[in-house]
Image (spheres, rainbow, N blue to C red):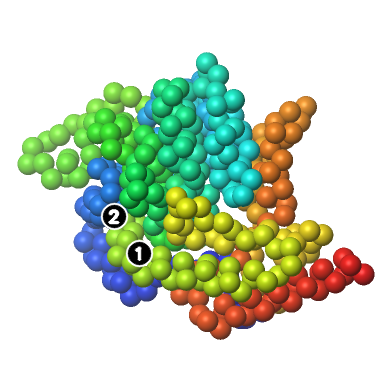
Amino acid sequence: MNDQIPIAKPMLGEPEIAATRRVIESGWVTQGPEVAAFEAEFAAYVGAKYACAVSNCTTALHLALLGVGCASGHDVITVSHSFIATANAILYCGANPIFIDIEANGFNMDVSAIEAAITRDTHAILCVHQMGMPCDINAIIEVAERHGLPVIEDAACAFGSEFKHEGRWQRIGSPRGAVACFSFHPRKVATTGDGGMLITNDPELDRRFRLWRQHGMSVSDTVRHGSRQVVHESYSEIGFNYRMTDIQAALGREQVRRMPDMIPARRRIARLYSERLGAIKGIGLPVEPAYARSNWQSYCIRLPLGCEQREVMQKLLDRGISTRRGIMNAHLEKPYLDPDQSIASSLVRSEKAQAECIMLPIFAQMTDAEFERVVLEVTNVLESVEAAVVA
């Protein structure tokens, strides 16, 4: 179908084209001055001291975990209900992901389950701001501080989201934990094609991230290139090739400038979805807690009882409406399968969310006509499926 409504659509245009042209014409396309400018502008937007750009959010999570000392034999408390990169980054360090369930009325970490999961091997807590909805980061920090544990925020989807701290709204990335990690994948609110960012207020962590992202090189390309004397770099420790290019960073700078338009547009669409879909019998709509303001990176609904997820998604696809299933669970994938099912038995909410939820199209430039069409088709499909179940 030519008029398919996508699940997401990056907002890219002439400013981004001009920015990439500027970089290409400059002759410096790898990590350089544009990356440095993007880092400064991103840090200012979220309200943090330091921002370190990397190749994607998975590499950001890996460096964040290494930065707080995660290593072989350590446990990291996290959720299975997240893109598999969250758990994979823990394994990259040789550590073990310890999965806890999600909250009853949302898709984020159940704070009440953290304390029971802490053991003498626990080294960190990795929480997720799922689909852009801030988790209860203040409560998570309280638990972590009682046990002397660092907190890393997987904020892959949460650029532009806000949380309330001490009565004041702050943006996710104004670090409550040790590090917050962001993604610029095309399905996110802002994109650089791909890319990631590490946010921290700790100068030592920022220094390590900058060292590790470029092979552990003691002197950066920009410093060496600008030096009036010959400089030979050294490599005192193992690093990685986790750099962002200046082409990506130039895109990112323009995307930051678009945020004042993109976030309100997405919030408007989410509000209208909740108003219009709330009349459907048995549907579950996303809940925004009092402490949170989502960027609405995704709008996720829980299907009425008796509706089969794949059937609903296929019927919508046949009508030109793209959807995605509920957020995956790492513990159900082959690398994390639990033979005795002891993990799965404690993750009932996570499994139900994957099986019973779908995400609807949402993007800042969504037209009223596209919105009305999605609402109409979702309503028609759910009513038809419900009628078939009753019959």
Is residue 236 or residue 203 the one in the foreground? 203
Q: What residue lies at 73% left-to-right and 28% top-to-bottom?
A: 342
- Does 139 sit left or right of 340 as displayed? left
Dot 1, how many residues are within 10 Å of its Cα: few (below 14), some (14-19), or many (20+)?
A: some
Which quadrant holds the C terminus? bottom right
Dot 2, how many residues are within 10 Å of its Cα: few (below 14), some (14-19), or many (20+)?
A: some
Tell me the residue that label 2 is attached to: 45
Compared to 367, does 42 lie above or below? above
Provide residue 12's location: percent of width, then percent of height.
40, 70
Provide residue 62's location: percent of width, then percent of height.
45, 35
Amino acid type, mark 1: Met
Which quadrant holds the N terminus? bottom right
Tell me the residue that label 1 is attached to: 259
Amino acid type, mark 2: Tyr
> Helix or strand or loop: what does disc 2 sit on?
helix
- Residue 250 in view here: no
- Does 118 sit left or right of 162 as displayed? right
- Does 142 sit left or right of 167 as displayed? right
Compared to 47, does 256 lie above or below? below
Provide residue 219's location: percent of width, then percent of height.
21, 35
